Image (cartoon, rainbow, N blue to C red):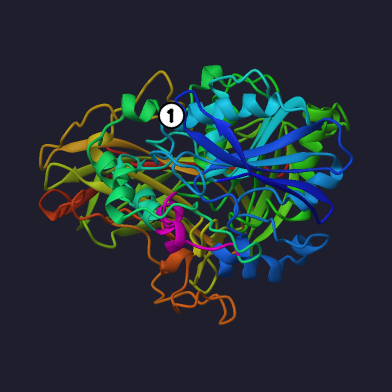
Amino acid sequence: MNQRSEIADGMRIDWDVPIEMDDGVVLRADVFRPLSGGRHPVIMTSGPYAKNLPFEQGWPWQWNLLTTTWPEVVEGTTSKYNVWETADPEKWVPHGYACVRVDSRGAGRSPGYLDPFSPRETRDYYDCIEWVAQQTWCNGRVGLNGISYYGINCWHVAALQPPHLSAICVWEGAAEWYRDMNFHGGIPSTFWPWLALTQILRVQYGMGTRGPINMHTGELICGEETLSEEELEANRCDLARELRSHPLDGNYYADRSPDWAKVEVPLLSAANWGGHGLHLRGNFEGFIRSASQQKWLECHGFEHWTTFYTDYGREMQLRFFDHFLRDAGSWVEDQPPVSINVRHVGNNFVPRAESEWPLAGTAWTKLYLDPRKGALTEQAPSQAETITYDALGEGVMFRAPVSEEEVEITGPVVAKIWVRSSTTDADLFLNLQLFDPEGKEIHFIAAVDPKAPAAFGWLRASHRKLNLDLTEEWRPYHAHDEMELLVPGKDYECDVEFWPTSIVVPAGYQLALSIRGRDYDHGSQVVPLGDQLAPSTGATGFHGVEMRGCGPFLHNDPLQRPASIFGGEVTIHGGGATPSHVLLPVIPQER
């Protein structure tokens, strides 16, 4: 595989530039840089989604939805070089930046063993950063900027402290391989094994002529070599097997998660209110727990591939990197430490500057579960009451009083639930939901689902043990280092972490808490995205997943939720000596 260079669309483009790793494996990178020559700051990504698979080719319905709703995304660019979840070089090179994309080991046009988020992959990223910094066209400053996978591995490589890494923008990037990505509250998620099959393996190095061909260049996206299925399988990890064999947190997950004490680089962490399941928790944890003295938090809405590309997102990223890579602009003076877009009914967002997270002046408000009335009340019932549901069923709901005035809820949510199970374990799926005056549920655009509730929380009861050193009143931190099975018929206190949320409850609307035995499902058969936007298969959603409220972030592996253990009945207690409650972050109108 030979590198080549050309001048096209106002840029110098170097294709398939070789970067040799310490073990002799050669990764391939594409470099886009100004025609003016000289030295430039670098915006960089490295990952397994294929560096030259065009966004519009690999993710057509997402591309159509994005560009139809936000035509500004395609203004001033041919979009030929716009790749999924990475910066469009045609919108960055004119500002004096070089853009570098690397196919990580075993993916796209880079050979090697494919092992997502492994220590080897992270070390490769470190070496690529340092290689870039030594090039004659680089000014010695490298910034990392990307969505999801390309944000997640920013946290990981930043913890290795590459000398020339100058700043990171983590756009909707999870962080902890255990809590954020694979075991929500200890409940196994099927997302990453599914994503590997649908999105990563289709561009594994060695697919060759069986893989995709770039619609603009005619080149093979997965390298010139075509390997057999047996060879491909031998060159990749079995992600599903790896996760099933590691049900508890430990070294395997620590090796694929950041050490926050070592993340010292300036950072912009951008979260999505609808990012439950992947694109949310890690951004808040990274902002709070990283050691960086120069860090900013932003939170927005819409689909997870949207805001990064809009003028709002791109201009924010540009101001951030101008300051740390070019010593230009007034980012530090102008950007508040926390910038949120408060979410309103109708998927409207109102921007607001804040000083800290959780928000200053938060009125932490407890609402108690009344099982007899199915209500959330300001005072706990004086007598203990219970309600029982099918442990794998739709569960029960507790409704708050109809709101007499507009109320804003922005921040982390926590529930303390007293639970009894008829078996040795129970999976608790909690949802914060909103209903209008007619009793119709109000849904919100999530990162990867168009109709989701206001917030999600999860906990496997046997994982209720807390890490007290990291637990806060507003955010329990579960240890996940051992299973404490239940004694059937005995009562247990469980603290359930909800991922952060923002919702302004209008007067006349009603908030509710549901506790279920399975993933949330709004009941629709399929949520249409419009005929012109739907995938050619006719199925809707992300890679054909039906959009029923959770998108692809599901917990439905029967091997990890056998009915013999997670079936039976669950009983919820309230009042008396077992006052189950939910803690809400109410934001006063005047603070």
Nearer to me, 4 or 53: 4
User: In the image, is 331 to the left or to the right of 373?
Assistant: right
Residue 364 visible in rendering:
no
In which quadrant of the rendered view does residue 229 lie?
bottom left
Residue 532 visible in rendering:
yes
**Residue at left 42%, top 56%?**
207
User: In the image, is 419 to the left or to the right of 200?
Assistant: left
Nearer to me, 586 or 412: 412
Which SS class for mark 1? Answer: helix
Identify whether 242 is placed above or below 63: above
Q: Quadrant of the C terminus?
A: top right
Q: Which residue is mark 1?
A: 120
Q: Is residue 202 magenta?
A: yes
Q: Is residue 206 magenta?
A: yes
In which quadrant of the rendered view does residue 151 lie?
top right
Identify whether 431 is placed above or below 500: below
**Residue at left 58%, top 66%?**
57
Residue 178 horizontal/vertical position (percent): 37, 36
For badge 1, the amino acid type reads: Arg
Q: Residues within 10 Å of mark 1 (few under 14, many from 20)?
A: some
Residue 91 horizontal/vertical position (percent): 79, 51
Magenta stretch, residue numbers: 198-214
User: In the image, is 536 to the left or to the right of 86?
Assistant: left
Identify whether 239 is placed above or below 524: above
Residue 238 horizontal/vertical position (percent): 29, 44
Given the current orientation, which residue lies at the most extreme front position? 2
Given the current orientation, which residue lies at the most extreme bottom position? 531
